[in-house]
Amino acid sequence: MTVSFDGLSGTDFEEFCADLLHASGFVNIDWRKGTGLATSPADKGRDIGCDHLRVEPDGSQHFERWFIDCKHFKRGLPPKELQNLLAWAEAERPDVALFIVSNFLSNPAKEYLDTYRRNNRPSFKIRYWEKPQLARMLRRKLTLQRKYDLTDMPLRSIKEILAAEDEFFTKVWYGRKASAEHYRSQGTPEDIIKGMLKAKRAAEKRFGKKNLGPWNDFEWGMLSGKLSALRWVLGDDWDMLDT
């Protein structure tokens, strides 16, 4: 997907990064904004501190501490913008120092990091996420895309949602109906049975009888889940499957 962060302010981009980390499984996220103002005057070298659960091949688990600096630049990030986080990481020794960049690291910045690794052999890992990595991480996170106006994918119209709800209502209703003989044995009035048979014929004409079941357990679960989700969008509570 194509993504641009140009419409975000620096603070908006920091907030986006905190939300992306949360959506990616990070915990104990501390966005060090420290003020209600539009800037973060004293984040002491990193914008966000958080923990990430690492699972080893033998199944053991431990949390890694990450320090993160969010860099919102329309051009390549210069080397001088890397120094604060690296200095703070040297002092505090996290497991990972991460730069999240709204565009790209400049080539001199990447060379600076390579030289820093060779000469300093830091105890922490140095990573960076540039625009292509952020786009890949956002691909299945439509809520984040919409919250920060990062996509032009249109929302479904109410007309489309209502049509889909009607379709799955009809299919669930049809699948729940027993034979006419069953209802006669239960003493159901004949006019009600005739009305049900007429409605079933209308559904068969509309969707085709082969598209109305019988359903296995998985298919029935999918039908019910779709109907529940559509009704939730339209204002009902979850799991409202009355037909």
Image: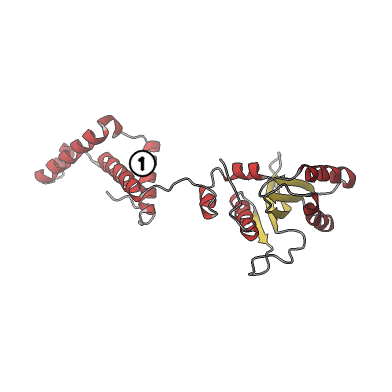
Residue farthest to the right, as pictured: 119
Relative depth, front residue between 99 and 59: 99
Does any portion of residue 42 appear in the rendered image?
yes
Residue farthest to the front, as pictured: 75
Residue count near mark 1 (Cα–Cα under 10 Å), binned few <14, some 14–19, many ≥20: some
Quadrant (top left, top right, bottom left, bottom right) of the N terminus: top right
Residue 108: image quadrant is top right
Q: Position of residue 38 (x, y in %)?
A: 64, 66
Residue farthest to the left, as pictured: 190
Q: How many marks?
A: 1
Would you say 88 lies left or right of 7 here?
right
The residue under label 1 is 223
Q: How is the image coloured?
A: secondary structure
Q: Position of residue 149 (x, y in %)?
A: 53, 52
Relative depth, front residue between 86 and 74: 74
Q: Residue at x 80, y 57 (%)?
A: 84
Relative depth, front residue between 211 and 118: 118
In the image, residue 15 above or below residue 140: below
Would you say 108 lies left or right of 54 here?
right
Does any portion of residue 213 appear in the rendered image?
no
Relative depth, front residue between 228 and 163: 163
Residue farthest to the bottom, as pictured: 36
Q: Position of residue 63 (x, y in %)?
A: 71, 51
Q: Position of residue 130 (x, y in %)?
A: 68, 45
Q: Residue at x 34, y 45 (%)?
A: 160
Q: Amino acid at mark 1?
A: Leu
Would you say 161 lies left or right of 65 here?
left
**Element carrying mark 1:** helix
Would you say 207 lies left or right of 54 here?
left
Q: Residue at x 32, y 43 (%)?
A: 168
